[in-house]
Image: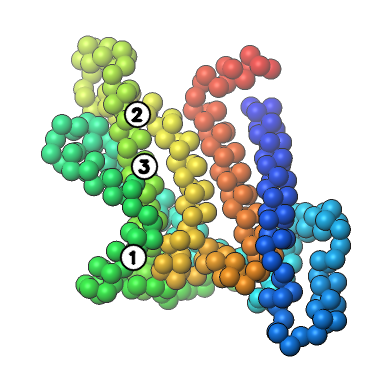
């Protein structure tokens, strides 16, 4: 177990170094940040002085080494656009994104797994066919189109829910404001959370359904039925348990995707998270914020993959046997 975790940690460090190099190379050359920070009437001497103070005239390897060492200390520099520490900006926006992602994952898991089980066990029923047909909407339509449609129906036409913003928030700690404790905060969360979770929900539902149908055809399920076990025990104790092994992997990866791709949903609903911060930074070539965001998303994927690998190792005995054989 310890060797397995250490091996995964070493792989994670290599991945983070590769991502830091890629993000540094891409964002460093997307444009001249000094030109976006100063006005048109700024003198060339002043621009050169600013470029020198930011270290933009240093060799590539010096800039990259400075970037990595500062990132390890949680220092991503000063935002060119807002003139505030990037770490402070991300921590101010992070609670909004994490709350949206958390609610979206819960919706996707609870409804996706539940509908997947139902459509597998009642696969010949009218409702199962209707659910499978409607699931194509969540898979095929782009997120921004779903969000715009929900906004138009529930916010503009019916006026049941707000169309943008996070609503009223309450300060829980000096670095965390939440909308979970206010009515307007919860109402503002509904439409973005449904929009963000719909694709993952249908994906999990179809995965659970296909895996459960496959498991129900196995010999040990027939043997359990021949022993006279109740259908409830066969379906939920034997079939569902083996169905969830691949679902754990996919769900873990999808959790990272929900945080990473919340950019579109946050833009549609003007949700004040790190995704909207990244979009505004792209428009102004705010390189430190863009690089920090990419590093943050990479770290989220690395941590989630590591947790999924460990969970998968604990659930699947075949991995433990192969690891011992390899050792």
Seen in the image, is 145 located left or right of residue 60?
left
Residue located 49% across and 61% down the image: 263
In the rendering, at what x and y percent does residue 233 appear?
A: 26, 25
Q: Secondary structure at mark 3?
A: helix
Q: Give the spatial CA distance, label 2 vs label 1.
A: 33 Å
In the rendering, at what x and y percent does residue 34 appear?
A: 74, 74
* Dot 2 or dot 1, earlier in sequence: 1
Residue positioned most to the bottom: 41
Mark seen at residue 203: 3
In the rendering, at what x and y percent does residue 16 appear?
A: 69, 46
Q: Are dots 2 and 3 in contact, CB under 8 Å?
A: no
Q: Secondary structure at mark 1?
A: helix
Residue located 47% across and 52% down the image: 258
The quadrant where residue 132 appears: top left
The quadrant where residue 75 appears: bottom right
State whether residue 138 appears in this view: yes
Foreground label between 2 and 1: 1
Identify the image quadrant of the N terminus.
top right
* Dot 1 or dot 3, earlier in sequence: 1
Which residue is identified by label 2?
211
């Amino acid at each position: 177990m310890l060797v397995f975790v250490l091996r995964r940690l070493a792989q994670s460090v290599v991945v983070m170094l590769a991502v830091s190099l890629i993000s540094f190379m891409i964002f460093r050359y997307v444009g001249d940040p000094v030109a976006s920070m100063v006005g048109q009437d700024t003198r060339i001497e002043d621009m050169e002085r600013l470029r020198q103070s930011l270290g933009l005239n240093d060799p590539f390897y010096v800039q990259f080494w400075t970037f990595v060492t500062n990132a390890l200390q949680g220092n991503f520099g000063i935002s060119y656009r807002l003139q505030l520490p990037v770490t402070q900006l991300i921590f101010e926006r992070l609670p909004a994104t994490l709350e949206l992602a958390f609610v979206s994952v819960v919706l996707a898991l609870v409804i996706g797994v539940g509908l997947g089980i139902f459509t597998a066990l009642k696969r010949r029923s009218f409702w199962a066919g209707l659910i499978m047909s409607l699931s194509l909407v969540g898979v095929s339509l782009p997120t921004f189109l779903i969000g715009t449609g929900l906004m138009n129906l529930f916010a503009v036409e019916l006026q049941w829910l707000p169309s943008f913003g996070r609503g009223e928030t309450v300060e829980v700690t000096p670095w965390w404001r939440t909308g979970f404790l206010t009515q307007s905060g919860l109402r503002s969360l509904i439409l973005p959370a449904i929009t963000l979770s719909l694709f993952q929900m249908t994906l999990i539902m179809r995965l659970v359904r296909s895996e459960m149908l496959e498991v129900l055809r196995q010999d040990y399920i027939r043997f359990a039925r021949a022993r006279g076990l109740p259908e409830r025990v066969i379906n939920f104790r034997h079939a569902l348990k083996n169905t969830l092994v691949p679902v754990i992997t996919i769900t873990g990866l999808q959790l990272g995707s929900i945080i990473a791709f919340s950019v579109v949903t946050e833009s549609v609903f003007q949700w004040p998270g790190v995704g909207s911060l990244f979009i505004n930074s792209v428009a102004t070539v705010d390189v430190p914020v863009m690089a920090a965001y990419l590093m943050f998303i990479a770290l989220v994927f690395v941590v989630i993959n590591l947790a999924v690998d460990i969970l998968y190792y604990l659930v699947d005995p075949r991995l433990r046997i192969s690891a011992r054989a390899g050792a």
